[in-house]
Image (cartoon, rainbow, N blue to C red):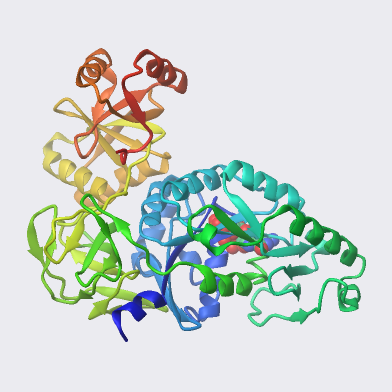
Amino acid sequence: MKQTDEIQRRRTFAIISHPDAGKTTLTEKLLLFGGGIRTAGAVKSNKITQTAASDFMEIEKQRGISVATAVMSFPYQGKLINILDTPGHKDFSEDTYRTLTAVDSVILVVDSVKGVEEQTEKLMKVCRMRDTPVMIFINKMDREGRPPFELLDELEEKLQISLRPLSWPISAGKDFRGVYNLHEKNLHLFRPGKTVVEEERLLVKDLDDPVLDQQVGSNARRLREDVALIEGVYDSFSREDYLAGALAPVFFGSALNNFGVRELLETFVEIAPPPLHRETNLRTVEPDEPSFSGFVFKIHANLDPRHRDRIAFLRICSGTFERSKAFLHVRQGKQVRFTSPYSFMAEKKQVVDQAFPGDVVGLYDRGDLKIGDTLTEGELLEFQGIPSFSPAIFKEVVNADPMRSKQFHKGISQLTEEGVAQMFTQGKNKLIVGTVGELQYEVISYRLEHEYGAACRFEPLPYSQARWISSEDPQALEEFLRFRDRNIVHDKDEKPVYLAESEWVLNSNMEKHPKVAFHTNSDFK
Ligand code: G4P
């Protein structure tokens, strides 16, 4: 197959949601459709249900499984679907944000009972930064959810994106009867059942078709009114707007009952973008360029201390990745080659000889690769846009066993490179760990102890916000750095970061220093 055909065939995306909205269930159902897995339950193993490090560690023990679910690929209707997995726990949301840099589109799952939740908004914000195309699946229609028009209004307002429903629910909860496909004008009747893959679809000529009344009874009138309202209020669906990240098509269904999932997948295959171009510090890289390039967006450590190697996940952006070929590791300025890169087809991890733009390969690494690293065939470019975001909790990490200081520092630096948490330094010796949630601290101390034989202690710090700072006026920046000396730290790239105790303190400093720019993520221009 030609390179361009390989590229056009690929659809690389992530399913994202606030925890519990149904991401895992939907992923599993999509894999069942694609033959990616044969049994229900195969995806669940990567999920953390409680806020306890022991749970996380339990998962980590099954590292083989979680590595295998980092990417799930399967062919469907002539396309090759690559689903990039994102962590189920909100304390690992940074990992999700990074994964979003490696996809070309997303499916956002929303719980019909809860509507827009905290994580839904945060994830959408990250999508908007890159104008990532978004499709929305409103899940759990078998529950007594909120009225669909109300949900759509809330989604539009809070997620700041225009919507276009492509299917419409017929009632909800116990009385949920199915969905009407606004695009194909057919009726899809709901029959509860968790494992059914085949679905029943009824064609209706138009909304006046008496079949509708026979099938859904008194709900038919309501459906007619709703559809008239939708056609009046919403513009018709524009793929161009969807691809520009300005318009999200919306589907209703129930992942648990495997209802509405096939429609979602079929539309996804039809409209979702193939691998897109990517920005670098020098120029835009197009996927169909002949030279290979790619970047690392995720690193998995090997928990077995006897085997220190890690697995770096590389998104291929252009050209062809080839096994054992020498590539340039741009940050280190040296040649690297990978003799057993692997891909993830169905339930199997297998060594690949070649991979194409849109694909993700796993590379064994002995500590050379960091998140954000670029590999090329020689060009000195670096991919952009793997930003760090402001953590919410900050603690100083102190070495609790002076005899094992070397192990402590090695462990801390490797764990940070993996993206377990963000590390900041203050002066020569003070190490500050910033996280989204407490679970990350538990994971760090567990892993320091078990993998590096080191011990640590965390001392809480009174900050709740981090802002990357810059100024076009060097004197103003200098003054601010001096004035707020106690609150200034440096990130992994030595960029200055201001830590504020509260939003109020932050705002008052922003007012006092109008020439200083305060950025919520590290990727500012
Ligand atoms: P997540 O990955 O987004 O965190 O969500 P997950 O798929 O694990 O789903 C969260 C809970 O919601 C699960 O129940 C799941 O069974 C349920 N769920 C998912 N889709 C639907 C749906 O369409 N309808 C209904 N009624 N429930 C749905 P749980 O009790 O937490 O877990 P489990 O014991 O069922 O595995």
Residue 481, compared with residue 162, is above or below; it is above
Viewer-proximal residue among 258 and 397: 258
Figure quadrant of residue 216: bottom right
At horizontal 64% and vertical 77% (from top left) the residue drawn is 195
- Tell me the quadrant of the picture where the N terminus can be found: bottom left
- Tell me the quadrant of the picture where the C terminus can be found: top left
Q: Is residue 501 left or right of residue 318?
A: right
Q: Is residue 49 left or right of residue 331?
A: right
User: Residue 79, image x and y in percent?
Assistant: 45, 79
Q: Is residue 525 left or right of residue 290?
A: right
Residue 431, compared with residue 129, is above or below; it is above
Q: Is residue 445 left or right of residue 17?
A: left
At horizontal 20% and vertical 57% (from top left) the residue drawn is 374
At horizontal 50% and vertical 54% (from top left) the residue drawn is 245
Quarter containing ligand 1?
bottom right
Residue 126, compared with residue 423, is above or below; it is below
User: Residue 20, image x and y in percent?
Assistant: 58, 54
